[in-house]
Image (cartoon, rainbow, N blue to C red):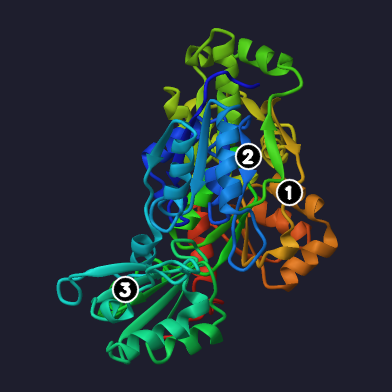
Amino acid sequence: MATTQLGLVFLVGAGPGDPGLMTVRGREVLEDCDCVVYDYLVNPELLALAPEHADRHFVGKRGHETSVTQEEINRLLIELARSHRRVVRLKGGDPFLFGRGGEEAMALAAHHVPFEIVPGVTSGIAVPAYAGIPVTHRAASSAVAFCTGHERPGKDAQLDWAALARIETLVLYMGMHKLAEICAALVANGKPVETPVAVIQWGTLPQQRVVEGTLASIAARAQAAGMGAPAITVIGDVVRQREAIRWFDNRPLSGRTVLVTRSREQAGSLSRRLRETGARVVEYAVNRQEAPTDWLALDAACDRLVGVDWVVFTSANAARFTLNRLRERGRDARAFNAARIAAVGPATDDTLRARGLNADLVPATFSGEALAAELIKAHRERSPGKPLRVLLPQADNANPRLKEHLVQAGAEVIAVIAYRNVAQQPPIDLAKERIDALTFASSATVERFVAALGQPALDALIGAGARCYAIGPDTAEALRRSGLPVAAVADQSTLAALVDQVISDLGEKAKPVGEASA
């Protein structure tokens, strides 16, 4: 709906790629906008921060390709300010450092459109840092110059290569297609031919690649390695520091792509752990969690907890949905009376603790048989001779093994649906991805993944080298039933243990990302 007053436009620097490098202020305005205009280099994860109702306009520009002109972008921002309350212009890096933010601000000012500048972390500093290269160093460089390798044709003042050759560190933006020419110009103006150079492509992202050389060799090496935009080039003795302080692209899973099959609500913790090891994460959620079609069974079970010995939560979702339902009905943890509580895994235990409940039993490993045995043993020690009654709030497609083992041991099990796992087809074409690892945190997810992907695509994925990792024995068995080879099984039913298994197995194998060095 059009407004009579012009909206506020924010020129926001999105940082160099890693979504964690976006500023607090940038995140604040993005989360509160009703329109976002973004570039090619903006990480898609940042777009997810904008409200679902916010209009989205892609105006990405790529070198040597037909794209939206700067004049068209300027006009679009002015038009959007007339119909929206808060417009975010999201730009890679910093808007005022080779980001053409100054031109956009001038256009807004000329049309009396209010705006705010939100600086961002610039690629010229962050990308070298992620490659282990400080742009200044007391022993190597006291001055740094940031230059563009793509000057506007016809600009009155061209770069003074004689002056630049005397500066200790040069950082080039957008210079790949002229790299040989730039190196030759620096050498011709007195910079030593053996000066170290590093080209960093996709800096700060898991797919970051680095090629090292000298002014004499770097152009040929970068071309041989297939280096292209987006890239930052660092010229100077500071490049030598990389050998000692390289930290980002030599982590255990650097250069690897890992598929996370958990639902969007659950994927965050596992994805974060994997990214911290250097992996590129592809989230492929084959299901989402929803409330039951009705609450009758769960409500009735929670109203008749007298005589129940154990309430067993086999997932954080089961705990979350059950406790939320109690709260909606005006009840709290006192509803459990004298029943003891079991939580499978630390995530479930943490969910309970956040609601003021301490689990009486958290099994070290989880399989239906092992958990049933621990429950029966604990009950016999506390109430010998008394029949065991268990309330089991669970998913609609829960693995039946726990209930089966308890019933076989003579227990009475009240299994009720606390939530549903609803299948969905992720909008990702895995045929276009090179996947090194598939991670599974439940047997139900295995089944839904196989159904969503289909056998031909599954065979192609495994045939291309993807390896499967399971959080526990039940999940591993589900993989085997589906015909999927199991590379490793976590020794504990935790996300940390699952990541450790991926690192232990995959981290030892030859990595696909190579480097050329001086």
Q: Are marks 1 and 2 in contact (CB under 8 Å)?
A: no
In the image, is residue 144 above or below residue 67?
Answer: below
Three-letter amino acid code at disc 3?
Leu
Which quadrant holds residue 213?
bottom left
Q: Position of residue 371 (x, y in %)?
A: 58, 41
| Quarter the N terminus occupies | top right
The residue at the point 44 percent across, 24 percent down is 357
In the image, is residue 449 above or below residue 250?
Answer: above
* In this picture, residue 309 sits left or right of residue 150: right
Of callouts 3 and 2, the N-terminal one: 2
Q: From this viewpoint, which residue is outermost toward the top? A: 330
Q: Position of residue 196 (x, y in %)?
A: 32, 84
The foreground one among 231 and 246 is 231
Callout 3: SS: strand
Q: Label 1, on which residue? A: 427
Callout 2: SS: strand
Callout 1: SS: loop
The foreground one among 272 and 508 is 272
Q: Nearer the viewer, mark 1 or mark 2?
A: 2
The residue at the point 23 percent across, 80 percent down is 166
Query: Circle 2: is it few (<14), some (14-19), or many (20+) Cα within 10 Å?
Result: some
Say whether residue 373 is visible. Answer: no
Q: Position of residue 308 (x, y in %)?
A: 59, 19
Q: Label 2, on which residue? A: 56
Which quadrant holds residue 186?
bottom left
Determine which of the numbered discs, if any, sits on residue 170 in the image: 3
The foreground one among 326 and 370 is 326
Query: Circle 1: is it few (<14), some (14-19), or many (20+) Cα within 10 Å?
Result: few
